[in-house]
Each structure stands twice: as structure tokens, then as C-alpha cells.
Image (cartoon, coloured by chain):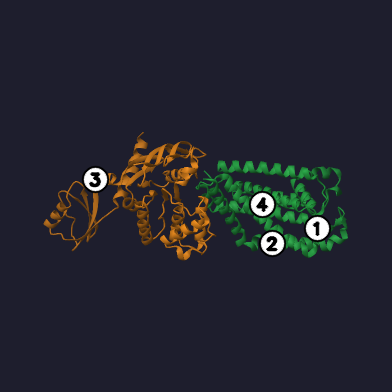
Chain colours: A orange, B green
């Protein structure tokens, strides 16, 4: 499959000497839904800023659908749609103008610009608000407005920098549905997010950056397969007097009617129930304690920090 | 981007800029009209008759071109500096930077917005001046070319100020401490021939003097300054500021990290 994004040895050192990116290399295939994860200050926004030409790189190369941002910047820019982390539209313009003006900057005629703005605002449930001042929109509406704006030039590569930050669950889920739809239609998507459930649910491939370095770059499935243990929370029918001792599973108290069980991914979950049943303990319900990716993410970041300290 | 797409982008930025100052016309168009009307009333009507003739014309007739020019200068400058800094402050300048629109189109778009506001206010002030004195036109072409060139020049200057500005204070320092004194000392209210030799020579270092006098020539057919010299100086200033503005935008000064 063709490459939507090719990054080689990308470096960014800010004035004052802070190295935000220390030689990052990665590829994003055309049509991919790619997650870019990392803790705060890891360098994700700097990387996205370089792709969108809001940040000047210090070294390395970036190519977007074969267009090098050094030698063919205008063509590279024409392929991109950006939803930044912070609101960056004119708060004193109505949404219809925010979106249509963005189309104009891509050379799209006014009539067509308004036609696309109408389609995008309708798709993102903002059509009723098209004439109000943008500053009066709610946080979730403002996020959706930035998505509507980013899609107006029909980008081949959509970059979303924490698009669901601060929006409620209902809107977040509807945004996921919308993003899946445009990805299915062929748009390559790069997503950064702090909601690891979001990355796990949406992304086919994931890269993790920490302190300006790439510490993982693989498929989401492969990444999750590296998890050795999972923790389940069990709700019991009746209170326990003492914590039972099981042969293959470590248990912990949560309260008298709830316990946690660590289960090795290689083991069958049936053995846990067999052992509990043998001790007369009845389980009413069960759920995953933590987000699986979250656990993995923490392990990777902790390991990377440990490696750096050791070296 | 092909030529048609670039023109669409230019039209988009210009329209956006015109809509911006039109929406807030009470802040942008009305105040300079009222202020200039007061100048006409106080300096022209009340004090003017006591001053007598200036350059062979009634004082009111003499100050009208200068006051129109002053309104154009301050408004074209103010429009671009406030709009550019506002777009930096709210970060919506990023909308243009991430797009394939070339820097010179962005620059021209802001300049067109500045010229549009300068001309709007200029026309409004001219209409108000008719209440006080009939319009005397010596050369419509000189009047028109000079007002356009001046508006372009101060729009470019406003953009440079907007690029460097880091706070709202920074966008008022230059207009208050540089632009206003230079405008007042640029021969709006007097002919430099009235000044002692030293001050006459010093006045020649003020670029606004050339614009006011050339514009006045368009109305009255008289000027303290040679007309060709005025055009050469204005063109030179425009070229210098245009190249410098483009350089700042290319470097991303104040807008890119």
C-alpha cells in the first residue's frame, strides 16, 4: 500500500535547547487509522505542527503522499486537513464562514465552498448553528466545527490532535462513528489522544512517543498481544469472611462484595470460575478493571524512562 | 495552486477582512468620521477664518486633503495591525498558514482589507467635508493614485507591526508615538514654507509630508514638494515594506515556531 506519510530522522530543537523530537522515523500507510500516543510533552504536537508547517523542523525529512515539505510544500499542504488541540478559528465569525473561508484558502470557489460547508456542518450536526457567533458554541460544538473545517478541502490525510478532549461521552462516541465513516471512505487518519480507549477502539496501528523518541510502532492488535496479565473485577453474590487462596490466580480485596483477580493471558478464564465454584463463591458479574492499552502504555513509558536512566 | 485558485484565496481573505471591519463599523468607520468632522468644525470653521489664507486658499480648503489623508493613513494601518494581531492572538492565522495559499497572497489579502477600510473612511470623510466646503478637484488621477498608494503603504506598515506585536499594547505604541506625530507634522494643518529653514529641512525626512502634499496637489494644484519626488519616495517605501513583509511571513516570524 502507498505511503501517506513518511518521516525520517525528524528532529526539532527549540530556542533554549529543548529537544522536542530526537530523530523520529515512521511511516503511515494510505487508508490507515493511525494512533500517535504519548504522555504530555512527549513531542506529539510538535510533530503534528511540523506536518502542518506551523513548526519549522530542525533536521530530517517529511513526505506527505510523496510531496516533500521542503521542496513541494504547497502540494503537501493540499493533502492535509488539521484539527488542532486548541480552538484556532475566529470566534467572531459564524461557523458557515469559518468553514467556507477555509475552503477559499484552498482555492475552492465561493459557491462550492458554501456547498461543502453546508454538507459538513449538516454531517456534524452544526447546521442549526451556522449563523451564530462561533464563540457562543459549546466545547463539543467547537470541536466538531474544527472537524467540519478540516474536511472542507477533502483532505487525503486528516490529522486530529486530541479531537475529543473535554467532550462528553455521547458526543465522543458520535465523533468516533463519524471518523470511522470517513476512514472507511478512504481518508487516512492520524489521531493523537489521551483517551487510550479511543485509540484502542479506532486505530489499526499505533506509535508511542516519549520525550521526543519513538518507543513503539506496531499494530494495535500486536501491541495488545504483548499484555501478559489482565485484571478482572468480580462482583460476588454474598460477602466473604476471608480472601480465598486460589492455585493459579492472585486475588485482592476491593470491598466485602468485590474482589479483583489477575489472570494470565495464556490461561483460560474458566479455571478461575472452576476454583471459585469449588470454594462455594458465586460471581454475579465481571468486568475488565483497566483499559488494556492504558496498562500497556504505562509499562512502555515506564520502561523507556528506566532504560534512559540506566544508560 | 494555479492562478485561478490563488485569486479565489485572495478574494476570500479580502472579503473576510472587509466583513470584519464592516461588522464593527461603529468602532472602525464612525469614530474617524466624527473626529474629522470636529477638525473641520473647529479648525476649519471656527479658527480657520482668523488664520486667513494658506497657500493661497481658504484655511478650510487647505486642510481638507490633509485630514482625508490622515484618516486614510490611520485607518489602513489600524485595520491591518489589529486584524493581523487578532488573528495571531486567536490563532486563526493558522488557517491560512496550513493551507497552500502562498505568502504573497496572504499579504495582498491583508493589504486589500486595509486599503478597503482606508478608502471607506476616506470617502466618508470626503462626504462630511462637503458640508463645510465644496470639493475642489485639480487632478482626479493624482488624488486617486495617491490615496491608493498611501493606503497600501500603511497597510504594509500595519502588517509589520502586527507580525512583531506580542501584546495589545504593542499594536498601539507605533500609532500613538510614531504615526500620529508624523501625521500631525506632515503638513496637514500648515505649509512647510511657513517654517524656519532648519525645520523645513527636517520636515523633508517625514514621508507623510510627501503623501499629504501630493494628495493636496490633486485637490488644489499646489504642493510644497515636487510631485515626482513624492511618487518616487512612496514607491520606494512600498517596495521596501513589501519585500520585508514577505520575508517576515516566509520566516514565519511571530506565527510559526
- In this figure, which residue is indicated by the disc labeled 1? B136
Q: Secondary structure at mark 2?
A: helix
Name the mark on residue A228.
3
Mark 1: secondary structure: loop
Element type at mark 4: helix
Q: Dots 2 and 3: beta carbons under 8 Å?
A: no
| B205 vs B128, nearest the viewer | B128
- Measure the C-alpha gap from mark 4 to mark 3: 65 Å
> Crowdedness of circle 4 by 10 Å Cα count: few (<14), some, many (20+)?
many
Chain of the residue that carries numbered disc 4 in the rendered image: B
Please tell me if label 2 and label 4 are on a single chain: yes
CA gap, disc 2 and disc 4: 15 Å
The answer to which of A233 and A294 lies nearer the viewer is A294
Specify whether A28 is left or right of B157: left
Could you give the CA–CA distance between mark 2 and mark 3, rounded to whole angstroms? 71 Å
Judged left or right of residue A3, residue B95 is right
The residue at which mark 4 appears reads as B77
Q: How many marks?
A: 4
**Residue that lies at the very extreme toward the left in this rendered image:** A278
Q: Which mark is residue B31?
A: 2
> Alpha-carbon neighbours of circle 1 within 10 Å: few (<14), some, or many (≥20)?
few
Q: CA distance from mark 4 to mark 1?
A: 27 Å
Most distant residue in the top direction = A311
For image coordinates 47% across by 45% down, the residue present is: A77
Nearer the camera: disc 4 or disc 1? 1
Amino acid at each position: 500500500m502507498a505511503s501517506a506519510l513518511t518521516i525520517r530522522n525528524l528532529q526539532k530543537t527549540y530556542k533554549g535547547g529543548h529537544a522536542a523530537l530526537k530523530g523520529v522515523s515512521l511511516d503511515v500507510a494510505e487508508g490507515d487509522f493511525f494512533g500517535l500516543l504519548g504522555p504530555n510533552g512527549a513531542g506529539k504536537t510538535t510533530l503534528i505542527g511540523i506536518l502542518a508547517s506551523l513548526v519549522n523542523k530542525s533536521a530530517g525529512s517529511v513526505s506527505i503522499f510523496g510531496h516533500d515539505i521542503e521542496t513541494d510544500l504547497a502540494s503537501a499542504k493540499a493533502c492535509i486537513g488539521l484539527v488542532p488541540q486548541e480552538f484556532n478559528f475566529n470566534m467572531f465569525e459564524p461557523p458557515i464562514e469559518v468553514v467556507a473561508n477555509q475552503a477559499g484558502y484552498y482555492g475552492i470557489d465561493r459557491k462550492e465552498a458554501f456547498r461543502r460547508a453546508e454538507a459538513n456542518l449538516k454531517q456534524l450536526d452544526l447546521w442549526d448553528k451556522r449563523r451564530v457567533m462561533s464563540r457562543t458554541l459549546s466545547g463539543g460544538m467547537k470541536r466538531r466545527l474544527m472537524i467540519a473545517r478540516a474536511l472542507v478541502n477533502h483532505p487525503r490525510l486528516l490529522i486530529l490532535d486530541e479531537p475529543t478532549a473535554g467532550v462528553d461521552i455521547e458526543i465522543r462516541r458520535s465523533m468516533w462513528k463519524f471518523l470511522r465513516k470517513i476512514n472507511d471512505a478512504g481518508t487516512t487518519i492520524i489521531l493523537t489522544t489521551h483517551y487510550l480507549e479511543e485509540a484502542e477502539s479506532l486505530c489499526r496501528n499505533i506509535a508511542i512517543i516519549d520525550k521526543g523518541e519513538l518507543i513503539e510502532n506496531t499494530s494495535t492488535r500486536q501491541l495488545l498481544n504483548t499484555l501478559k496479565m489482565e485484571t478482572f473485577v468480580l462482583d460476588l453474590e454474598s460477602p466473604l469472611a476471608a480472601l480465598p487462596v486460589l492455585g493459579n490466580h492472585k486475588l485482592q480485596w476491593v470491598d466485602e462484595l468485590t474482589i479483583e483477580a489477575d489472570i494470565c493471558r495464556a490461561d483460560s478464564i474458566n479455571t478461575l470460575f472452576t476454583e471459585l465454584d469449588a470454594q462455594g463463591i458465586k460471581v454475579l458479574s465481571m468486568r475488565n478493571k483497566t483499559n488494556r492499552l492504558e496498562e500497556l502504555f504505562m509499562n512502555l513509558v515506564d520502561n523507556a524512562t528506566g532504560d534512559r536512566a540506566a544508560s | 495552486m494555479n492562478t485561478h485558485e490563488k485569486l479565489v484565496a485572495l478574494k476570500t481573505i479580502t472579503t473576510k477582512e472587509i466583513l470584519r471591519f464592516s461588522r464593527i463599523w461603529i468602532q472602525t468607520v464612525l469614530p474617524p468620521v466624527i473626529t474629522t468632522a470636529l477638525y473641520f468644525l473647529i479648525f476649519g470653521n471656527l479658527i480657520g477664518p482668523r488664520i486667513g489664507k494658506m497657500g493661497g486658499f481658504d484655511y478650510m480648503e487647505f486642510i481638507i486633503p490633509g485630514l482625508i489623508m490622515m484618516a486614510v493613513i490611520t485607518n489602513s494601518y489600524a485595520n491591518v495591525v489589529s486584524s493581523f494581531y487578532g488573528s495571531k492572538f486567536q490563532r486563526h492565522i493558522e488557517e491560512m498558514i496550513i493551507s497552500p495559499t502562498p505568502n504573497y497572497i496572504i499579504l495582498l489579502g491583508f493589504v486589500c482589507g486595509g486599503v478597503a477600510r482606508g478608502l471607506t473612511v476616506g470617502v466618508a470623510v470626503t462626504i462630511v467635508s462637503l458640508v463645510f466646503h465644496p470639493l475642489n478637484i485639480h487632478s482626479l488621477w493624482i488624488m486617486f493614485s495617491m490615496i491608493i498608494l498611501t493606503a497600501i503603504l500603511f497597510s504594509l506598515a500595519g502588517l509589520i507591526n502586527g507580525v512583531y506585536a506580542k501584546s495589545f499594547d504593542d499594536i498601539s505604541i507605533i500609532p500613538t508615538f510614531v504615526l500620529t506625530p508624523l501625521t500631525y507634522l506632515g503638513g496637514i494643518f500648515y505649509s512647510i514654507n511657513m517654517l524656519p529653514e532648519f525645520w523645513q529641512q527636517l520636515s523633508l525626512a517625514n514621508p507623510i509630508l510627501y503623501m499629504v502634499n501630493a494628495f493636496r496637489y490633486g485637490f488644489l494644484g499646489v504642493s510644497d514638494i515636487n510631485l515626482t519626488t513624492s511618487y518616487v519616495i512612496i514607491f520606494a517605501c512600498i517596495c521596501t515594506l513589501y519585500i520585508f513583509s514577505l520575508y517576515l511571513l516566509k520566516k514565519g516570524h511571530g506565527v510559526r515556531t
